[in-house]
Amino acid sequence: MRKVISVFWVALALAGCEQKNLTQQRAERLAETKNELLIAVAWPMNSSKTTLLDGINLAVEELNQSGGVLGRKVKILLKDDAASLTKGRLVAQEIADDINVAAVIGHLNSYIAAPAAQIYERAGLVMITPGASVQKITDQGGKYTFRSLPGNRDQGRQIADYAAEQRYKRIAIYYIKNDYGVDLANYFEQRAHELGMTIADRRSYNMGGGNHAAILADWGSFLATDAIFLIGSLPESAQILHDIRAAGMKVPVFGGAGLDSPELIKLGGKSTEGTVVFSLFNMDDPRPEVFEFGKRFKKKFGTFPDSTAAQGYDTLKLLAQAMKTANSTVPDQVATALRATRNWHGVTGVDSYSAKGDLVGKRLAKVVVRGGKFEYFKAAPPK
């Protein structure tokens, strides 16, 4: 019996050692191999944001045509997290267990990205999320965790500043009841109070809930507000806009980046007219790199890129640049290079990183729905 117990503890110790050394195993494999550079992409494949893959594929094509990254061709390992927390964790663990993977681009949803980031941290794997803005993802203190969009603290501040510029005094907030919605609503409200605005009402809704019309009808009858800040995602936000107008409310509506997709107009029709949406990309930005990117993208895919496609393109290009700067694909060195990034120019703007892995000072673009399409606000000329 004593021998059996001894064997058990030895096996357990070896298993623990193997888990502890996963970071080192990956680093050694990536330092030694000259094979294709494997980048995982974890994303919901049945969403309005799948154009991310088009942007990534264009970036892969351009990188490989120019010799790859440090002489290695880039290959994408695509994983569908199905916008599910359970599936997302399984996908993250599958990626983490593969020591051939050099980095991860993903996830879209903050409620998946936050626990996934911890899985990647334990495996010594760089993660850059181009879609999850909840502040705690980078506030967790991870060594390998980054995002390629402004966090909710910054987004809330920028959006509230816009509301103040529009001279709105009383604003109603209607937000999805998840990590993203609560986080962005909180930061927006905090900044709104600093600027002297009043939150006329604040209501949350559950994803898939059907009570929007009743709540918004009450607002239409009894609430005095200058504007509505809508925080949500698609397809639900299109129905909410319909219900806002059906309730007789004619006040301006402005929405977070979760509404930033042509699907909003396709699903919401005339109800979306006049809606201002904060965007991660401005196709009318006068910088030549934006024009050239749009031209190349349209040649390959037959349409101009939306902001999600631009995010995918930039995120992979940024990752490749960090590897070239580090002269290595080993995650420790890549993470150090990313954290030291200052004034890297992508098609979505200029990227500089904080010690926490957050972007610093990156401005959101704005679009407005006019005539059944997004019309971009003109960006300021580059200095």
Image: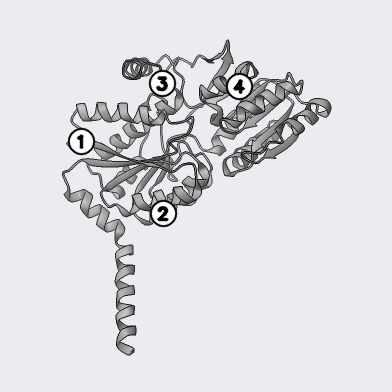
The x and y percentages for residue 312 are 38, 31
The secondary element bearing badge 3 is classed as loop
The N terminus is located in which quarter? bottom left
Q: Is residue 334 left or right of residue 67?
A: right
Q: Could you tell me how far apart the alpha carbons at marks 4 and 3 are, in whole angstroms? A: 21 Å
Q: Could you tell me how far apart the alpha carbons at marks 1 and 4 are, in whole angstroms? A: 42 Å
Mark number for residue 73? 1
Residue linked to disc 3: 305
Disc 1: CA contacts within 10 A as few (<14), some (14-19) or many (>=20): some
Q: Which amino acid type is marked by label 2?
A: Ile
Residue linked to disc 4: 268
Disc 4: CA contacts within 10 A as few (<14), some (14-19) or many (>=20): some
The x and y percentages for residue 249 are 75, 21
Q: Which amino acid type is marked by label 1?
A: Lys
Residue linked to disc 2: 119
- N-terminal label among 4 and 3: 4
Q: Could you tell me how far apart the alpha carbons at marks 1 and 3 are, in whole angstroms? A: 24 Å
Which callout, 2 or 4, points to the residue nearer the camera? 4
* View extreme (top): residue: 371
Disc 2: CA contacts within 10 A as few (<14), some (14-19) or many (>=20): some
Of residue 2 and residue 368, the one placed in the foreground of this image is: 2
The x and y percentages for residue 82 are 46, 42
Q: Which amino acid type is marked by label 3?
A: Pro
